[in-house]
Structures are given as structure tokens and as C-alpha cells.
Amino acid sequence: MHAKRSNPAVLESLRGPHRPPVALPVSADYQFCVDAGVLAGAGFLDDLALFCLHEHIAGSMRAFVLGLDRAWSAPREACDVWPASRRQACVDAFAAGYLGRIQQELQLFAQATEFGVRP
């Protein structure tokens, strides 16, 4: 990431609100990108029988980048605040959120099967 990392972006815990969120190696400036990735990762898990992971993440990434590009092409003052040079950092943050959510689900699955519980 090229951004200054004063505070990290976070991934909320799936193990309940009493558990602390996971700090990601991404600046909190990109939390909205992480959140979009988390939602896309959750969408993959909902449609697990319909898509392969590599297909879903590629399609989700394309849709996210298309949205970024459209937002940056709009004539607004916000484009001055978020220059297109931050595009790669946004994509990286999206991927961190997406893969972070998948990893959380896999950890829960592994824990459940370790104790003989089927999810």
C-alpha cells in the first residue's frame, strides 16, 4: 500500500461482537474498499455451489474496479481528494477484505470439524 498507515482497516470478527476485530495491513482510509471486499466474499460463500473461487473473485474485482473508474471519471471535487493514483491501493484493500472473509469462514469450518460439529 502506498497510503500512510496511521490506523489499520479492520475486519469484523465472525465469532461474535464480543471478539475484537482483526486489524489488516491496510490503512483505515481504505476501509470502504475492505468492506466492499467483505461483502463480495460473503456473496461468494452464499453462491458457493454456483461459482468457482477464481471466477468469483475475478468477476467481483472487475466490478469493483469498474465502479472505481466510473467514480473517478465523474466531474466532482471528490476526485481531487481521491486521485486515481490510489486505485491500486483500493484494489489491494478490496482483495484483503474478500480473502479475509473467506479465511474467517474457513477457520470457523475447521474449528467446527475439529470438534466433530458439522456446519
Image: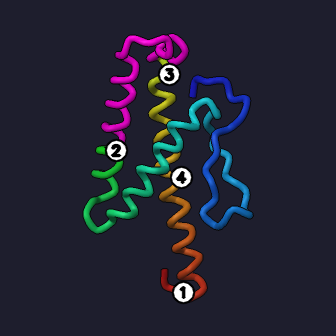
Q: Horizontal placement of 25 versus 77: left or right? A: right
Residue under pointer 1: 117
**Could you tell which of marks 1 and 4 lies nearer the N-terminus?**
4
Give the quadrant of residue 29: top right
Element assignment for label 3? helix
Residues shaded magenta: 60-84
Number of residues whose C-alpha sits closer than 10 Å to that of mark 3, classed few (under 14), some (14–19) or many (20 or more): few
**Could you tell which of marks 2 and 1 lies nearer the N-terminus?**
2
Quadrant for the N terminus in the image: top right
User: Closer to us: mark 2 or mark 4?
Assistant: 2
Colour mode of the rendering: rainbow
Residue under pointer 2: 60
Residue under pointer 3: 86
Question: Label 4 amino acid?
Answer: Gly
Q: Determine the main secondary structure of the stretch shown in magenta.
A: helix
Question: Label 3 amino acid?
Answer: Arg
**Could you tell which of marks 1 and 3 lies nearer the N-terminus?**
3
Kindly check if marks 3 and 2 are in contact, taking CB atoms under 8 A apart as contact.
no
Question: Label 2 amino acid?
Answer: Ser
